[in-house]
Amino acid sequence: MSDNISKIALALSCVAIVGAGVSIFLPKSLVINEKDDAQVEESVKRIFQKNPQSLLDVLNNAVSMKNKEATNQMCNDIFTNRESIKKQAIVLGNKNAEKYIIAFNDPLCPHCRTFQREIVKRIEKDGDLCVYILPVAAISEDSITIAQLYYAVNEKKPDQINKFLKDVADMRDINNNGIVALLKGVGLTQSDISSIVNSCRECVSQNGMLAEKLGIPVVPAIFIVGQTSANMMQPGQTIDEVMKSVQ
């Protein structure tokens, strides 16, 4: 009995997530039309008792469909707004590449740092690769500090941005001495960038607002953009796989 109760709770939770989308997938005999929350809950319980697995399958399918729809919408929005997005980004590699990568990443996110390290290595080997990086601060205040340094280094020492990104990816501790060392590694000091810190912080803030507007759910969020469409890189996929899927 307790197992059934837990399944009912799961079903009701899924209903809360899926919302109106449930009615699209339920058989006509199971469509919930009641507006009152109590009636909706009672209807779900009756459906569950009649055919629990069927209802759970329907809800799982609905959640999966909504996730797919959200991803497709993100990709469409990225493609539609690609030119304005590129203007906000730090550009790495060949700007004339037919296909390119747009990546939202947090300097302190372990997965972002792995991506950053690997993509810089690849750019150095592949002359036909272009990456537009939009640093965001999703983890902590320290993320803001490092993210704004991306813009500062890109403005003051654009020829050193690849090295700087690799240094950040390999960095272990975030503190003032570490930041000084990062800047020193590309031939800069804190005084060199003091005049542009505010504008760099504004760039990071704009990236955060853009990510929120586009509904970016996680970092790194990596999109491959082609001539007619954009695709989001999924866990387990390689850049080459996604590149081939984009026209």
Image: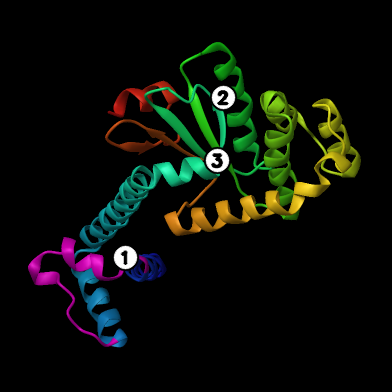
Q: Is residue 1 left or right of residue 22?
A: right
| Of marks 2 and 1, the one in the foreground | 2
Q: Quadrant of the N terminus?
A: bottom left
User: Which kind of residue does numbered mark 2 sit on?
Assistant: Ile
Alpha-carbon span between mark 2 and mark 1: 37 Å
Q: Quadrant of residue 186?
A: top right
Alpha-carbon span between mark 2 and mark 3: 15 Å
* Residue segment shown in magenta: 17-36
Report if the CB atoms under discs 2 and 1 are less than 8 Å apart: no
Residue located 34% across and 69% down the image:
8
Disc 1 or 3, which lies upstream in sequence? 1
Q: Position of residue 177 (x, y in %)?
A: 91, 39
Task: Between residue 126 and residue 67, name the one nearer to us.
Answer: 126
Alpha-carbon span between mark 1 and mark 3: 34 Å
Task: Between residue 163 and residue 20, name the one nearer to us.
Answer: 163
Tag shown at residue 89: 3
Q: Position of residue 143 (x, y in %)?
A: 71, 48
Identify the secondary structure beneath mark 3.
loop
Question: Is the residue marked by circle 1 packed among few (<14), some (14-19), or many (20+) residues within 10 Å?
Answer: some
User: Which kind of residue does numbered mark 3 sit on?
Assistant: Ala
Q: Position of residue 125 (x, y in %)?
A: 56, 11
User: Which kind of residue does numbered mark 1 sit on?
Assistant: Val
Secondary structure predominantly adopted by residues drawn in magenta: helix
| Of marks 1 and 3, the one in the foreground | 3
Q: Is residue 28 magenta?
A: yes
Identify the secondary structure beneath mark 1.
helix
Q: Is residue 10 left or right of residue 197?
A: left
Identify the secondary structure beneath mark 2.
helix
Disc 2 or 3, which lies upstream in sequence? 3
Q: Is residue 143 magenta?
A: no
